[in-house]
Amino acid sequence: AQTVTQSQPEMSVQEAETVTLSCTYDTSENNYYLFWYKQPPSRQMILVIRQEAYKQQNATENRFSVNFQKAAKSFSLKISDSQLGDTAMYFCAFGETSGSRLTFGEGTQLTVNP
Amino acid sequence: SQTIHQWPATLVQPVGSPLSLECTVEGTSNPNLYWYRQAAGRGLQLLFYSVGIGQISSEVPQNLSASRPQDRQFILSSKKLLLSDSGFYLCAWNGYTFGSGTRLTVV
């Protein structure tokens, strides 16, 4: 069974600075999908970024980018130019295929300070 | 475009009462549908998933059940709620697109 580990329960960053959230996973699969979700206080799960394991290029979405290290089974999220609205819980998730169930980490609470 | 609807948004129910949460998807056919539960401050736990009408797979033994009476409709039910059923319930389709969730409090 796959497992996802987020080792940082809480993190904080100053507005406009850069922060990196860590995620490691364990799987015996060669092709799979990795996701980062943002969950604000409304608890809506908002997809931030998605990475397909067979693609070597790291995914980016505006201020959000990932560092995908397949051999190390690491999938970190970098948020550049942090904004107050980035304050939220962030979850890393693993999926065997594009439409399959997801296995989630326990989350990292990110606080952006003014 | 595809959209997912989930209701109600908030629910307070007494112990022993029944439960019915509904999730519907628009703009697609034969979607994979999922029910997750999230305890406060924790990650999501998969409860049920369905790959088609009448096809339900259960991940965790519990006081809940799921049904899929129509292609784009997924229902989470309970005959008698327990205090431990309190939590935040999320429906998802295609694996990674989530509804807005239902906050259930059993009192």
Image (cartoon, helix red, strand yellow):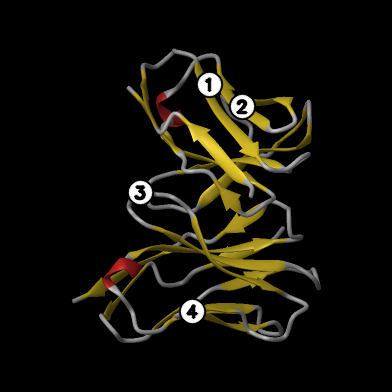
Helix or strand or loop: what does disc 3 sit on?
loop
- Quarter assignment of residue B17: top left
Q: What SS does tag 1 mark?
A: strand
Q: CA distance from mark 4 to mark 3?
A: 23 Å
The residue at which mark 3 appears reads as A42
Residue B86's x, y, as percent? 41, 32
To the question of a shared chain for discs 3 and 1, the answer is no
Within 10 Å of the Cα at label 1, are there few (<14), some (14-19), or many (20+) other Cα atoms? some
Q: Residue furthest front?
A: B1
Q: Are marks 2 and 4 in contact (CB under 8 Å)?
A: no
| Lateral position of residue A3 relative to residue A87, left or right | right
Which mark, by number, is residue A62? 4
The reply to whether label 2 and label 1 mark residues of one chain is yes
Disc 2 chain ID: B
Q: In the rendered view, would you say B80 is above or below A57?
A: above
Pointer 2 with pointer 1, Cβ within 8 A = yes
Chain containing mark 4:
A
- Residue neighbourhood size for the residue with mark 2, other residues' Cα within 10 Å, grouped as few (<14), some (14–19), many (≥20): many
Residue A52 falls in which quadrant of the image? Answer: bottom right
Q: Residue at x 40, y 84 (%)?
A: A80
Residue A61 in percent (x, y) is at 53, 76
Amino acid carrying mark 1 in the image: Ser
Q: Amino acid at mark 4?
A: Asn
Q: Position of residue A47 (x, y in %)?
A: 53, 61
Viewer-nearest of discs 1 and 4: 4
Q: CA distance from mark 2 to mark 1?
A: 7 Å
What element does badge 4 sit on?
A: loop
In the image, residue A76 sits, relative to residue B104, either above or below, namely below
The residue beneath circle 2 is B75
The residue that mark 1 highlights is B20
Given the image, what chain letter belongs to the residue carrying mark 1?
Answer: B
Q: Measuring 61% from the left and 26% from the top, which residue is drawn there?
A: B75
